[in-house]
Image (spheres, helix red, strand yellow):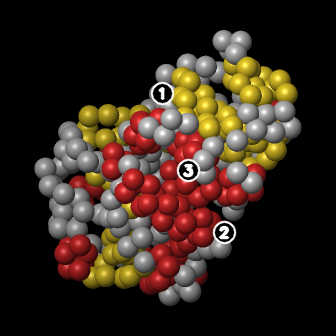
Amino acid sequence: MRVIVVGGGVVGTMHAWQAVERGHEVVQIERESEARGASLRNFGQIWVSGRAGGEELDTALRARELWERIGAEVPGLGFRAIGSLTPVRTAREYAVAEAAVARPDAAARGYKLVTAAEAREINPALRGAFEAALWCERDAAVEPRTAQLHLREALRATGRYTFLPGREVREVVGPGAVRDDHGDVHRGDAVVLATGAWLSGLVRELVPELPVRRVRLQMMQTAPLGEPLTTSVADADSFRYYPAYRSGALDELNAAQAQAPTAAAHKMQLLMVQRLDGGLTIGDTHEYEHPFAFDTLEDPYEHLTEVVESFLGRPLPKIRHRWAGVYAQCTDTTRVVHRQQVADGVWLVTGPGGRGMTCSPAIAETTANELGW
């Protein structure tokens, strides 16, 4: 079988991986010289802890298994089974963490409520003031800026993979066939459009009423911390944004403990991961109303800096990079992904939202199974 994958981000690359792993030939087409969207502009978190139960959690857990397996085959991914800690400071925050640990699926997530001293044993860099922490053993991380590069190197080594950058697919010209802006036609037994947040052009022509929206966020990265940050770190505001934490305790938190004004205005939470070079990737904000601003705002970065420094008990290293990114999210946020046959032999796979890096291996596996690869 010959598979055409359109899109060079992590969802597209994982579809290429699934097809090659099953013995097929793959041509992957990317409109930029390299992927430049959400697949690079993210934390690199394999984030099981906050996922909704049912299909979303099952997908995340299966993806976590696949990431670990692929990471063993492709060491350049930088896969690390680091887990995550969410420090809590108030009785209401503690109650939300306690409710999470009481969930029927808490063991599958690796949840444990630990004391501040136990949290510091797990992650000695957390020298700031907090009362306890929610530990999630199943969370992990990879290197988002280089993951696709290393995956493609491994795919090329099979001899059954071709990467064609700098080509925008413009038209479906027949069953399993597309034409790019160079005029070349690419024919296969199946075409997968994994175009991320690029929802205009061909995608809009094929699905004018696509049930997917775009979300913009701001993030930053620091110089090396100078010591290991042995886990990912979130703050209690993350409880407000992830469905796994929904409970009566969360309702009470939302009603009685307001977010900081900047965090509320920009729909913020803290997520933080250390990169292999020692720097910290820190975010994020959420913006849903179009058109998005073209500039980044300083207040969210100041808020994030204050929160991080309060957990670390030390000044943040120099900020080296600030950026904004856009990802595609199903308007029905309970859906893991939008997967739709849009023409004869052509499927669109988009809209995983902030779950793309976490869930992409399992999303691609499901596509491959459903299409009978």
Type of the residue with mark 1: Glu
Q: Which mark is residue 45?
A: none
Q: Please state which of residues 40 and 360 is positioned toward the viewer in this rendering.
A: 360
Relative height, residue 360 to residue 83 (above, below): above
Left or right of 237: which side holds 203? Answer: right
Type of the residue with mark 3: Glu
Mark in front: 2 vs 3: 3
Relative height, residue 45 to residue 95 (above, below): above
Relative height, residue 296 to residue 88 (above, below): above
Q: Which of the image's four quarters has the N terminus?
A: top right
Sequence-wise first label, 1 or 2: 1
The answer to which quarter of the image holds residue 297 is top left
Q: Please state which of residues 244 and 34 is positioned toward the viewer in this rendering.
A: 34
Do the residues under discs 1 and 2 have CB atoms within 8 angstroms?
no
- How far separated are the C-alphas under marks 1 and 2? 31 Å
Q: Which residue is mark 1?
A: 34
Residue 241 image point, x, y percent: 54, 61
Q: Which mark is residue 21?
A: 3
Q: Secondary structure at mark 3?
A: helix
Relative height, residue 1 to residue 186 (above, below): below
Residue at x 55% of width, y 66% of height: 62
Left or right of 246: which side holds 226? Answer: left
- Residue 328: tell me if it is visible: no
Q: Which mark is residue 55?
A: 2
Left or right of 340: which side holds 45? Answer: left
Classify 10 Å Cα crowding around label 2: few (below 14), some (14-19), many (20 and above): few
Residue 161 image point, x, y percent: 55, 35
Classify 10 Å Cα crowding around label 3: few (below 14), some (14-19), many (20 and above): few
Type of the residue with mark 2: Glu
Q: Secondary structure at mark 2?
A: helix
Q: Please state which of residues 366 and 121 is positioned toward the viewer in this rendering.
A: 366
